[in-house]
Amino acid sequence: IPRWEYLVSALIKMRPTCISRLAATSIIASSCRVRVRYAPSPTGYLHLGGLRTALFNYLFAKRNNGDFVLRIEDTDRARFVDGSGEQIADILRWARIEPTEGAYFGGGQHGPYFQSQRTDLYREKAAELVDRGEAYPCFCSTERLSRLRDELSRKGMPSTYDRHCRSIPKDEAQRRISMGAPHVIRFKAPLSHDGIVVEDMVRGKITFGSSHVDDAILLKSDKHPTYHLASVIDDHCMGISHVLRGEEWLSSAPKHMLLFKALDWAPPVFAHLPLLLNVDRYRLPTTFFLFSSLNA
């Protein structure tokens, strides 16, 4: 018996509304080639919530005769834990929810499936966004940004960037870059809009106001991408049709919608899954559950 069947029965009991909405929506998905992905970061042990996300992607792909891709988002080198990517793959094998392509599972035609091996593509697209006027170099020091956060905190305001470098002329910005000035690349978010609409398979239509989107960093000073840039580029280049992920990423959805638009790409369909809670509405002791299961 596939070991994920035990997880399925428990998850259906916990979140019947989420399960039923995904099942109903999957019928519509048959009009296109369904490609979903599970994209963990190798920063430690796999949590139960992450395994639940992988399971939902696996089942959605199976129901629609689609593809289930494993992508390893390993660009955060400061938090990288050696061996955790292999551990994630081992747990997926143990649970018998193996991807049809991706890292540790034979690769595929849309690789490489490790983001650390795709950095040239991210830098190319970041430069393209700057050329289009959709992004800009930011030269603010960590000290200035720290002072800005402290000031906003004292005023009880959200800790968002004040767009200090947004108005620097392109030739001046290029001069600073040629002189070796440290910088990041920020997204030039619209200053005003009628609302960013995200059609979510679980939650329905969600409209985000302009306050939900700031000039997010796309490329860090070490030339590695942030999650926002790399995720959008990879979802497009890997042909991902549906993104099923945890609701903690819901606040990122409007940024991603704007990035898809800035790059002239059609966005995938989103589904943000509820947090995994126990009967007392607390998050489960996820690492303990996985080790208990693996040792059973």
Image: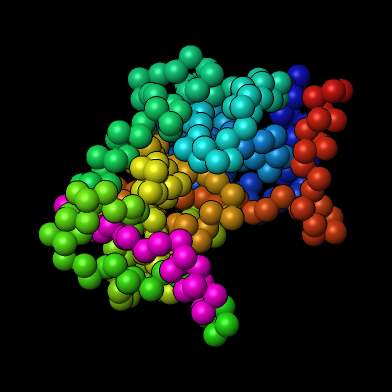
Reply above or below: 43 against 144: above
Residue 164 sits above or below residue 217 on the image: below
Where residue 123 sits in the image (x, y, percent)? Answer: 29, 41
Residue 64 horizontal/vertical position (percent) = 48, 32
- Quarter of the image with the N terminus in it: top right
Q: In this view, does 241 lie above or below 85?
A: below
Q: Where are the magenta residues, as a range?
A: 129-152
Left or right: residue 217 compared with residue 288: left
Q: In front here: 140 or 191?
A: 140
Q: Which residue is drawn at 47% across and 74% down?
A: 148
In the picture shown, does residue 74 fall above or below 219? above
Residue 266 makes an appearance in the image: yes
Q: Residue 286 appears in which quarter of the rendering?
A: top right
- Residue 265 shows in this picture: no
* Picture residue at 85% right of the left edge, 30% below the top: 292
Q: Residue at x 59, y 49 (%)?
A: 246
Membership of 137 in magenta stretch: yes
Using the image as rendered, state which of residue 224 and residue 221 is in the foreground: 221
Task: In the displayed orientation, state which residue is furthest to the front.
Answer: 179
Q: Residue 139 lies in what quarter of the image?
A: bottom left
Is 206 a magenta residue?
no
Q: Can you give x and y, in whole percent of width and height, for residue 36 in the image?
A: 47, 35
